[in-house]
Image (cartoon, rainbow, N blue to C red):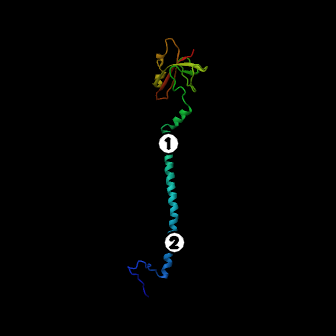
Amino acid sequence: MSEQVASPSAPDAAPPQPAAETSQPAAETPQPAAEASQPAEPEAKNSGAKKALGIIGAIVVFLVIAGLKFGIGSAIGNYLNKDETADAKAGDCIAELPEITGTKEEKVDGAKVVSCTSTDAAYNVVGRVDGQTEAQAKAPTSCEQYLKQGEEGYVFYNIEPGKTGYVLCLTKKA
């Protein structure tokens, strides 16, 4: 048996071919490796998509929790149940409210500012005090400075427990 060896100075020379008996198993071995590399590419794409969806999902969950914790729910509730007297000032008029006698207190829904020429106008706003606590609003002197001596007055306030809000000092519209 003779062996063939290519000289290092022959760049065009083809690499030596292995014997016929060894070439067949060598040809079969690379094929499964090539086939195995093809499915790895779609798996890489799928795992990247899964990572992106996981990150997006985590961000959405974080935003929902942050929104609930920091008051987006409250903001939506305030938008749906808007306080229509929040911007009332002296000189405005308020629509009819429940009749209250003595020191009794009643919760009011739907109070609103109306034009003083409207037939719905029942009270004149004679004063407004901001930054009041609920205890300050309930004090008998909360609107004293806005009422004339002997004039009957009413106090309307919107203050969340433990926070501050505003007090409207009202008189019955003549």
Hey, which residue is sitting farthest bottom in the picture? 1
Q: Quadrant of residue 4?
A: bottom left
In front: 63, or 163? Answer: 63
Q: Residues within 10 Å of mark 1 (few under 14, many from 20)?
A: few
SS of the residue under disc 2: helix
In the image, residue 102 lies at what x, y percent?
Answer: 54, 17
SS of the residue under disc 1: helix
| Residue position for label 1 | 65
Q: Residues within 10 Å of mark 2 (few under 14, many from 20)?
A: few
Of labels 2 and 1, earlier in sequence is 2
* Residue 31: mark in rendering: 2
Q: Residue at x 56, y 33 (%)?
A: 80
Position of the N terminus, as image quadrant, is bottom left
Looking at the image, can residue 27 be seen?
yes
Looking at the image, can residue 99 be seen?
no
Q: Quadrant of residue 105?
A: top right
Q: Amino acid at mark 1?
A: Ile
On the picture, is 163 further left or further right than 81?
left
Q: Residue at x 50, y 60 (%)?
A: 44
Looking at the rendered structure, the number of numbered marks drawn on it comes to 2
Position of the C terminus, as image quadrant, is top right
Q: Residue at x 46, y 16 (%)?
A: 145
In the image, residue 8 lies at what x, y percent?
Answer: 38, 79
**Alpha carbons under labels 2 and 1: distance apart:** 52 Å
